[in-house]
Image (cartoon, helix red, strand yellow):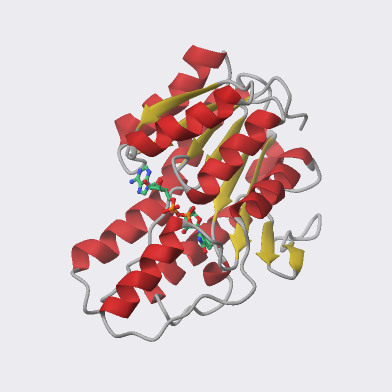
Amino acid sequence: MEIKGKAGVITGGSSGIGRATAERLAKEGAAIVVADLDEAGGAETVKHIESAGGRAVFVKADVTKLEDARRMLDTAVSKFGRLDILHNNAGIGVGAPGFPDAPPERWHLVIEIDLQAVILGTGLAAPLMQKNGGGVIINTASMAGLYPHRQDAVYGAAKGGVVNFTHSLASWSAERKIRVNCICPGIVDTPLVRRGLELAQQHGIKSWMPSKIIQPEEIADAVVTLVRDDSLFGCSLEVRPTGRQIVDPRPAPGSRR
Ligand SMILES: NC(=O)c1ccc[n+]([C@@H]2O[C@H](COP(=O)([O-])OP(=O)(O)OC[C@H]3O[C@@H](n4cnc5c(N)ncnc54)[C@H](O)[C@@H]3O)[C@@H](O)[C@H]2O)c1
C-alpha cells in the first residue's frame, strides 16, 4: 500500500515502538491518530510529528474499553476522512513479581491489553477500512509469542495468541482486502524494557540488557515494510538484532487447513 495520503491509528503511540512507528508513518506521508493512556507522552509524539511537517492528533484511549477503541478509530475518519492503517501496539508485561506471585488482576490485564484489545481493534477497524476498499493491520506480538518465554509465561501466552490470531486471519484478510500481519521483535530499547529491568533488580531477579539491542526505529522500519508489501497477509515478521525473517504459515491454495 502506498503510505502517502493515508490515515492510521497507532495504539501505544506515546512511547517506544508506537512513537517510532507514528513518527515514521507520518514522515512517509500518513496522517496519524496517536492513541494511548499517557497524555503527556502522546502530546510529545504529536509535537515531534508536527514539527517535522506531518499531521497527527492525540486521543486518550484505553484500548481494552470498547467505547475508547471505537472513538480512537472514528477519530481517523472524522479528522482525516479515512482509516487505512491500524497498528495494534499497546502492551505491557506482568513484571516482577511474575506468575503466579503477581495478583491475578495483573495477569488478566496483560491478556486484556496484549491480546483482547488486538482482537477488539481488528474487529472494529475492518468495516471502517472497507469503506475505502481495504487497509492494513499490524499487530505487535513478540518473539515471546513464537518461542517459549520463561521470564513471563503470561506475556508469552498473550503474544502467542496474537501470532495465532494473525495467522488464522489469512483467508479473512484476502477476502476483505484487509491485510493483517504481526511483528515479532526481540528485545527493543524502550521504557517498557528498562522499567522491567529495574523492577527485576528490585526483586533480586537476575536480568541484563543484551549487548546488541534493537532500536524502536528498526521496528518502525519493519512496520513500514508490512504496510507497503501487498503480498504479505497472515504472516509474522521476526525482527532480531541480526536481521529479519518472514514466518509464512499460509496454507497452500485449495488446502482444507
Ligand atoms: N520493548 C521490547 O523489547 C518489545 C519486544 C517485543 C514486543 N514488544 C511489544 O511492543 C509493544 C510496545 O512496547 P514498548 O516496548 O514500546 O513499550 P512502552 O512501554 O514504551 O510503550 C507502550 C505504550 O502502551 C501504552 N499502553 C499501555 N496500556 C495501554 C492501554 N490499556 N491503552 C492504551 N495504551 C496503553 C503505554 O502508555 C505506553 O505508551 C508492546 O505490545 C510490547 O509488548 C516490546
Can you give x and y, in whole percent of width and height, for residue 184 in the image?
61, 61
Can you give x and y, in whole percent of width and height, for residue 96 in the image?
29, 74
Does residue 73 appear to the left or right of 7 in the view shown? left
Task: Identify the residue shown where x is 63% and y is 26%.
Answer: 52
Can you give x and y, in whole percent of width and height, for residue 142 in the image?
55, 63
Task: Identify the residue shown where x is 64% and y is 21%.
Answer: 53
Please say if 238 is above or below 119: below
**Residue 227 sits in quarter:** top right
Task: Identify the residue shown where x is 45% and y is 70%.
Answer: 156
Q: Nearer the viewer, residue 159 or 14?
A: 14
Does residue 62 appear to the left or right of 52 in the view shown? left
Please say if 206 is above or below 180: below
Q: In which quadrant is the N terminus drawn? A: top right
Please say if 23 is above or below 165: above
Does residue 217 appear to the left or right of 41 in the view shown? right
Q: Nearer the viewer, residue 24 or 177?
A: 24
Q: Nearer the viewer, residue 251 or 196?
A: 196
